[in-house]
Image: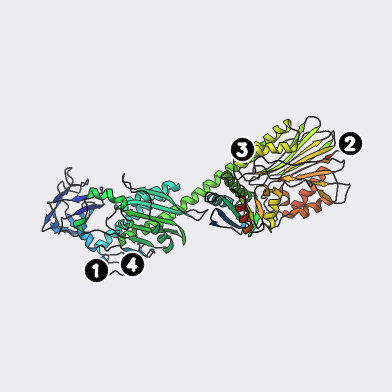
Amino acid sequence: MTAAVQFSTTISDDVAIAMIGGRLDANNAQGVREKLAELADQAQSVVVDLSSLEWIDSSGVGALVSLYKRVLTAGGKVNVACLNGQPKEIFRLLRLDAALRAFPSVDEAVAHLRADS
Amino acid sequence: MGALVAELVAVSGPSQGKRYPIGDECVLGRSFNSDVYIGDLNVSRRHARILIDQQKHVIEDLGSGNGTFVNDQQVTRCALASRDVIRIGGSSFRYEDESEEARWAPEVQTIIGQLMKPTGAGFPAITLPPSDDPKRATTPLIEEVTDEVPAATAERALTMLEAIYGVTDAIAAELDLESLLEKILDHLFQVFPQAERGFILLVNEATGQLVPQAVKQRGSHRGGLAFSQTMVDQLMAGGSGVIRGQTVPPPSTRPARTADLSRQRTQPSENVPKIGVPLTLRGASLGTLHLEGRAKAQPFSPDDLALLSAIARQAALAIENARTGQQVMAQQRLQADLELARKIQRSFLPHQLPDVPGVNFFTHYLPALHVGGDFFDIIQLADQRIGVLIGDISGKGVSAALLMAKVSTDLRLFSRQVTSPAEILTHANRTLMEANQDAMFATALYLMIDLKARTFAVANAGHQPPMVCSTRFEGISELDVASSVALGVVPDTVYPQETYELVPGDVIVLYTDGINEAMNRKGQEYGMRRLRSVLVTGPVAPQAVAERIIADIRRFVGNTPQSDDQTIVAFGLSAAF
């Protein structure tokens, strides 16, 4: 219940990779949103690695939506990688694939970003 | 030997902080034309003078009423050495011979003192690594207070205590963090006349980052507001106070004072004396506090560090108090904010259901304490059509409530202009995109009942698909409505739409995720499986179906506080239709 969110980032060339793990909810979504915004300013496109994300609520989705809008405005793209469990269900319900394309691995998500650009 | 370059620094009294260059002769007194004017009735008009004798500065008492003291010894005439303290009436001045300072100031000096622990008498103690410099080693440190206190130590201790009390008194009651930090720096500038710039950095509670919160610089002097990152890192890492010294060129190559000021900006930071302490409270690091002096000025002393550490303890406490106070105020503001949000939200939800012949509606709306973003509406339209809307705005509080109000108003308006649910959602998506609240989005399902045709058309923007309870088949079915992305995420989204037959005896149940995600004490979700099973059997009337769900959820969650709004809209053709 109280497991916190984990967040880390790496930037390789033009693609930034954000790892979000644990629980992304109303308690930490604002902080994550700000960090994602900083990241969006540093790279053209972003891959969000959700392999260790266990739970997400609407505020958490809001943080990702915010990232998507920011990157889109700047002409970039956001792909997500390794969706599973509850977050996968939420993504399916909200049809977020229209905004954030999901890939089974970070490598594929990155490769598709590069191929598209 | 070069010319004698010396200054008097007022360390206490009405002129505290002022520096007086000493030329060949200077007079100290209460007379306005004194070189060092002291506005104190205990001081004679011409009290004392300093002159040069055998290439040294000498102080002479000019027959004053209350005497002249050097290092607490009354003198009539006395040669001055650097760092001697001259006391006249209630004022003290430190004599600084810069050539002498330069001789024993090591190249770059770093003194790291352990963070002070209060001793029994409440005086700060400081421990320092041993020094090779004989003069440095004899500098009296306040280590502990015994019954027999040397007069000089006692006075220094008293000065320190006064400074500590002064700061504590000024900051204890300050609950506004910004003004508090400003006051702390103001006082530190009074206590440390040589401080030119002061910085307070605090750890941001949300992000864990160290952020500059207050900066002060003396006078109009501009040295830029950049601070030493090395200093801050050292303070955060070491948990102890730090003094950094200076490099002083030999006196003969010393540039003139005016040139000094103009060159200051380009001085390497080693030339700037610095003193800093971490701000800690109950073992937790709140941030750092540090001061920087003028480039090439005399370094801060271990006594200064002891004093700054003592003040920092009080400052940390006051900062914590201010933060707690602000949290309480923020809490109160949040409460008011939620109250407003609740009012806005309620005012935009239907107060009364339309009385439509032929269709039975039942709605259940149970808002969570912290205001979720559920919305719903039933809109009676021309040509025996009825619009049914349900949705959920992400986010909480006033901004979410206002956006929900806007979206539901727009949807109601569009309902009268276009007949297709898909188009209505397209409009709503545009409204939300234009609202430009980047982290906000809404799920929504729009269902248009056509009583003439006995059909309903549905379009879905990322919302839970409706359930159908029927006597025609065993169990329940979920309307497999094609859905597109939630509102407010992707511009110009096109929503698919499907039309279903409305069969008498069927009950269509629309709901929000507050239903299937209702949580019990153990943190378990009510879930879709329970929701389906409770719908399987029993009476088939919109109200009865909804009430079965509500009762089952109540049993499941017990008295666990509700974390999200719960909304159900159920409807079916009435038997008579």
Please name the amino acid that badge 4 sits on. Leu
SS category of the residue bearing label 2: loop
Comparing labels 3 and 1, the label whose residue is closer to the camera: 3
Instruction: Work out whether residue B552 can be spotted.
Output: yes
Near-viewer residue (B170 or B183): B183
Magenta region, mostly helix, strand or loop?
loop
Label 2 neighbour load within 10 Å: few <14, some 14-19, many 20+: few
**Magenta-colored span:** B63-67
Q: Which mark is residue B114?
A: none
Where in the figure is residue B430, as x and y percent of width and height? 65, 37
Same-subunit check for callouts 4 and 1: yes
Q: Earlier in the sequence, mark 4 or mark 2?
A: 4
Q: Is residue B554 above or below residue B569?
A: below
Separation of residues labelled 3 and 2 (CA atoms) = 45 Å
Would you say the residues marked 4 and 2 are in contact, meaning their CB atoms lie under 8 Å apart?
no
Question: Can marks 4 and 3 be said to lie on one chain?
Answer: yes
Which residue lies under the disc numbered 2?
B576
Q: Which residue is mark 3?
A: B434
Q: Chain of mark 2?
A: B
> Are the residues tagged 3 and 1 within 8 Å (C-beta)?
no
Quadrant assignment for the N terminus of chain B: bottom left
Q: Nearer the viewer, residue B433 or B128?
A: B433
User: Which of the two marks, 4 or 3, is nearer to us in this view?
Assistant: 3
Q: Are marks 3 and 2 in contact (CB under 8 Å)?
A: no
Q: Decide: few, some or many residues near mark 4? Use Cα within 10 Å; few <14, some 14-19, many ≥20.
A: few
- Identify residue for label 4: B128
Front tag of 3 and 2: 3
